[in-house]
Image (cartoon, rainbow, N blue to C red):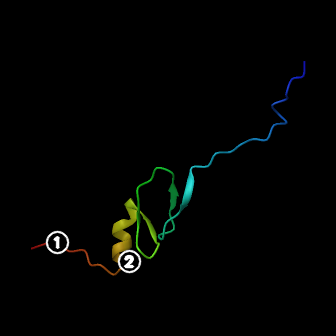
Amino acid sequence: MQVENPMTRPIRVESSHWGIDVCGDEILYGDVIYEFPDGEIVLEENISQYLIQVLGATRKIAE
């Protein structure tokens, strides 16, 4: 009987990396993202930063 040596099998590394958003942060599988019509992808936690810095939105308090 021949026994396979586990030390010689290729190791399969599963990555949870999905990509990088426009703010430069890593996107992992399962993260909530927003995709804009021009193709830009933004993580949910970066959406305020994207609106202010990239799109030029101004954050204000309604008075």
Q: CA distance from mark 1 to mark 2?
A: 18 Å
Q: Position of residue 55 (x, y in %)?
A: 36, 79
Q: Residue at x 38, y 77 (%)?
A: 53
Q: Residue most toward the top?
A: 1
Disc 2 crowd, CA 10 A, few/some/many (<14, 14-19, 20+):
few
If the image is split into quadrants, where does the C terminus sit? Answer: bottom left
Badge 1 marks a residue whose secondary structure is loop
Q: Residue most toward the left?
A: 63
Q: Identify residue for label 1.
A: 61
Q: Residue most toward the bottom?
A: 56
Answer with the quarter of the image where residue 59 lies.
Answer: bottom left
Q: Identify residue for label 2.
A: 53
Disc 1 crowd, CA 10 A, few/some/many (<14, 14-19, 20+):
few
28 above or below 43? Answer: above
Q: Position of residue 20 (x, y in %)?
A: 53, 64
Direction from residue 30 to residue 10 in the image, left or right: right
Q: Residue at x 13, y 72 (%)?
A: 62
23 above or below 4? Answer: below
Badge 2 marks a residue whose secondary structure is helix
Q: Amino acid at mark 2?
A: Gln
Q: Residue most toward the right?
A: 1
Q: Amino acid at mark 1?
A: Ile
